[in-house]
Amino acid sequence: MKAEIITIGDEILIGQTVDTNSAWIASELNIIGVDVLRITSISDKKDEIFKAIDNAKHLADIILLTGGLGPTDDDITKKTLVEYFKTELIQNKEVLNNIEQFVIRRKSSMNERNVQQANVPKNCKIINNSIGTAPGMWFEQEGRIVISMPGVPFEMKEMMSSYILPVLAKKSTNSSIVHKTILTQGCSESKLAEILENWEYNLPDVISVAYLPTPGLIKLRLTAKGKTQNLLEKLIDEQIVTLEKVIPKLICGYDSDKLEELIGRLLIKHNKTLSVAESCTGGKIAHLITSISGSSAYFAGGIIAYSNSIKENILSVSKSNLDNYGAVSKQVVEGMAEGVRKLYETDFAIATSGIAGPTGGTEDKPIGTTWIAVSNKSKVVSKKFIFGNHRGRNINFASLTAINMLRKLILEK
Amino acid sequence: MKAEIITIGDEILIGQTVDTNSAWIASELNIIGVDVLRITSISDKKDEIFKAIDNAKHLADIILLTGGLGPTDDDITKKTLVEYFKTELIQNKEVLNNIEQFVIRRKSSMNERNVQQANVPKNCKIINNSIGTAPGMWFEQEGRIVISMPGVPFEMKEMMSSYILPVLAKKSTNSSIVHKTILTQGCSESKLAEILENWEYNLPDVISVAYLPTPGLIKLRLTAKGKTQNLLEKLIDEQIVTLEKVIPKLICGYDSDKLEELIGRLLIKHNKTLSVAESCTGGKIAHLITSISGSSAYFAGGIIAYSNSIKENILSVSKSNLDNYGAVSKQVVEGMAEGVRKLYETDFAIATSGIAGPTGGTEDKPIGTTWIAVSNKSKVVSKKFIFGNHRGRNINFASLTAINMLRKLILEK
């Protein structure tokens, strides 16, 4: 099946918002074998929406729209679709109920605009919005599917994942596609490509590989296309087994695994607890860990120690180490890990201390210099890294690297 | 003048790359009064490029292409444009010289592909690439401009800034455009629209409004279009003054301001320091604050207190309050704020305690229930919120709401 994505909103055309929705949608559609042939961003104008859908019809079986479903007057997608599909709005009790629940939870009260959001086109299937007020709409006409979703990324992703993607995956009559993604950590893209050159050369013809660099992780996506699903799965599995032999130390997960989820599962499995002491990562590690539901079972919390006095007074880092080696040092980061582990009475601890930038570097310790330590009762492991110049990236890299070091330490046991 | 941006590359259509070029180009064109009417992403295929340019001609005076100018076989934009404009390639000495200089600077040697990059279409103006090897191309035909640039953001931006934008600005005979964005916090989109209904109704015709919801913030964008830049600016400024009277408590910033940046500036201005005690936000507030370069000047750090024992033992929250009211309560969150403020010896503190979900809710305290406190030496302010069911959103909302409560407390002084 072929798709076009149309994003609606002046904020994209004036460059105020970067359209990240399309990349996410395209990548998810790709996985279920739906090819995205074009992505178009247009303004909140009826004529433009009409023209864009008409154009897309020449190209695509599935047309996905995002944006313009909010409750305010500049949101015109719903009424435009009503006109396009020559239908009318009717109140949907289920949607109204959903909106009421949503509004009540927020201790707010229903207003006219909320009620209007429950009026939906008569001839479409409604897609429930479990985390917002604007429902999605699924139209079918002349064998073509037109889907309209909110532009808010959270809401769009929830709708795609819980309903749209599973339904489209069943309809997709393409030749079979099997994807498997391997997450690697600790090696650059070009280095990884070098290590895997021989393996890649010997791959069966039906399998292709893509290197997907993300901050802190390189993902390796294997795609097999062909007739028989079972055979493709077998071929992919064989390659995974081979890869696990070629780069055993670099592989840290599979598919949509997140490192913070993996270490959560490991800590639960081993019945262990964790605390963190963060300097340069400034709370990002704790944020990643607590973004996982259920993390309170193994995560006690942590200390963000931006100043030396906190490192010394709360984390009990030795003053002489701070004076002699500086905050960004093996001695101090190890002291931080041990300090927080004892203070929070946990089995494991992570600590970071570095220069995130863009200022603060010296000749001796340039921007990006980062010490990371992980520890348990019997051992402290620490390592120095020199990341780049970009503050946000450095914080990301350091956080994921630290979580991966913890993963390795847990697996050692 | 009206423009369309066309980005060329399969990596965008499979969702591997987020198209950030278009937003940048659109925003720069907008400033010089060029309206972007559509953004289209297409694959590296001749037919698609032909079709996209033909489509754009119906809409735009200026068509800007990015991508597909590299030295490898999948880069087909240049040869496609040669065919489209029925011209031929000729070697350009200046470009060849530029490429040679570039290759020498990288301590490499010229190869066949480098030489081919100096072959350019006969009937176009060449745009120098001062930081890469692929030159840009500027075609004019039937009063329309077609510009082709590399997809590498650095190179594209350099070409736009040093040549394309200045030339287009001179040609732009459009009416002027003035934008101003107001950031609001603490009110839903539909509620805000209700409050502003009367104001919106009385707006001058040349001004339009868009509501842009983002997690934790609603942005209100005012756009004025007309002949005279000065007059438009004056009209917009008048509306900002009115809005500041209508929703004084909701406005928390302007244009590209971020809340975490705003409180950073405020703390520096008042020479004050900050610490945080986070339970349900799990490090997100600290992460937002430390994402700002220079935050170590005012941010001492904080405590992530996921467990009750940490709240009691490290933050000195009273055990009887924890027992009597539970962790998610006014008493405990105020105790946390005061505890961390004293422990870290800072002027201000933020504390959060809530049920981020998706599990852990009770009838009394449903998922999303969150207590937030901010404090200084003379006062503790706390407030209860009930956000939604989505863990990630709740963490986001709570974090931005907390930072905004701090902003208000600082401004009270």
Image (cartoon, coloured by chain):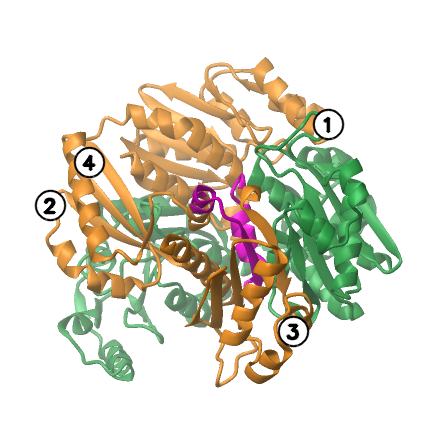
Chain colours: A orange, B green
Q: Give the residue pinned by disc 2.
A: A205
The answer to whether residue B302 is magenta is no
The mark closer to the camera, 1 or 2, is 1
The mark closer to the camera, 4 or 1, is 1
Crowd around label 3: few <14 · some 14–19 · many ≥20 (10 Å): some
Label 1, label 2: how many angstroms apart (C-alpha)? 59 Å
Crowd around label 4: few <14 · some 14–19 · many ≥20 (10 Å): some
Q: Give whichever of discs 2 and 4 has the lower sequence position.
A: 2
Q: Give whichever of discs 2 and 3 has the lower sequence position.
A: 2
Label 1, label 3: how many angstroms apart (C-alpha)? 42 Å
Q: Are marks 2 and 3 on the same chain?
A: yes
Crowd around label 1: few <14 · some 14–19 · many ≥20 (10 Å): few
Label for residue A13? none
Residue type at mark 2 is Asp
**Rendered view: B180 above or below B113:** above
Q: Are marks 2 and 4 on the same chain?
A: yes
Residue B93: percent from left, percent from top: 22, 79
Left or right: B150, with A152 as reference point: left
Q: Give the residue pinned by disc 3.
A: A308
Secondary element at image label 1: loop
The subunit letter for the residue under badge 2 reads: A
Left or right: B143, with B229 as reference point: left
The answer to whether residue A289 is magenta is yes
Q: Which residues are magenta?
A: A265-294
Q: Give the residue pinned by disc 4.
A: A233
Q: Nearer the viewer, residue A309 or B1?
A: A309
Q: Give the residue pinned by disc 1.
A: B364
